[in-house]
Image (tube, rainbow, N blue to C red):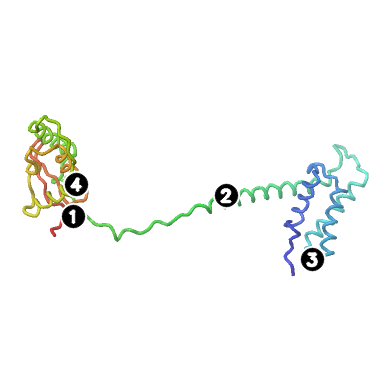
Amino acid sequence: MYEVKLDAFNGPLDLLLHLIHKYEIDIYDIPMKALTEQYMQYVHAMKEVEINIASEYLVMASELLMIKSRLLLPQQETENDLEEDPREELVGRLIEYQNYKEYSLLLTELKKERELYYTKSPADLSHLEKETHWDKNQTIDLTQLIVAYQRVKNRVALNTPKAVEISKDTFTIQQATEVVAKHLEKQTSFNFFSLFNFNEPVSKVVTHFLAILEMSKAGLINIEQSNNFEDINIIRGVNYSIG
């Protein structure tokens, strides 16, 4: 048995639409004689190549012949209007099929466009979560830390010679981090201002400040201040480890 598919046509309605478009036929005023003849040529061609013709093609052929014969009969007027056009039902089916066909092409294009995207389900990263407990009493507002930084910066500026000196900055955040870590190796906490002698360049103060922010973000240290404008202490954080 063969799958019933005549060339590129999927069923008799598809074949009729092809003929209508090919011969530029007005779908609302179909010349049944010409359309039926063209349709029957395709059906006979199927027989000649010994293709098993599906019953739906033969049923449509009989419907076309019936519509054609009804159009040849003289029309009789009723009390209200002329008799119903025998082509009306066929036209409705063709328009409906044409709409479905166009929607099918649209959905196919949308499917192809969607296939260009790749989606991945969310991965379970719960095993990477680390429960941490923060003591609110051991944290200060970022504004207070900036105020402390400004105080150190101002004191450094007062003790720095006004002569302009251009030099390469070799003190890195990693080095500043190591300085803070060495202080915490000796003691569990230390005063923020003990990091400076107030004669170092401003860039070194800034580097220390950035290192402290990074360590605080990583949970290696906590920043503590008892009251506003008092000294700031650096203490070991929840993620701090020696060695």
Circle 2 is placed at which residue position? 110
The crowding category of the residue bearing disc 2, from other C-alpha atoms within 10 Å (few below 14, some 14 to 19, many at least 20), is few
* 2 or 1: tag closer to the N-terminus: 2
Task: Return the disc, 4 or 1, that comes first in the chain's sequence.
Answer: 4
Rendered location of residue 125, percent (x, y): 33, 58
- How far apart, in angstroms, are the residues tagged by discs 4 and 1? 19 Å
At horizontal 24% and vertical 57% (from top left) the residue drawn is 130
Task: Report if the CB atoms under discs 4 and 3 are less than 8 Å apart.
Answer: no
Question: SS for tag 2?
Answer: helix
Give the left or right position of residue 57, taking residue 114 as reference: right
Query: Which numbered disc covers residue 51?
Result: 3
Please say if the residues under marks 3 and 2 sit with CB atoms less than 8 Å apart. Answer: no
Nearer to us: label 2 or label 4:
4
Q: If you read the primary sequence from the N terminus, does the residue marked by circle 4 or circle 3 appear first?
A: 3
**Residue 78 versus residue 111: which sits nearer the camera?**
111
- Up-down relation of residue 105 to residue 128 (above or below): above
Q: Amino acid at mark 1?
A: Asn
Task: Please name the amino acid that badge 3 sits on.
Answer: Ile
Residue designated by label 4? 173
Distance from the alpha carbon under mark 3 to that under mark 1? 79 Å
Mark 3 and mark 2: span between their CA atoms?
35 Å
Q: Are marks 2 and 4 in contact (CB under 8 Å)?
A: no
Indicate which disc, 3 or 1, sits on the residue closer to the N terminus: 3
Reading the chain from its start, which is encountered first: label 3 or label 2? 3
Q: Residue furthest bottom?
A: 1
User: Which residue is identified by label 1?
Assistant: 239
Q: CA distance from mark 2 to mark 1?
A: 50 Å
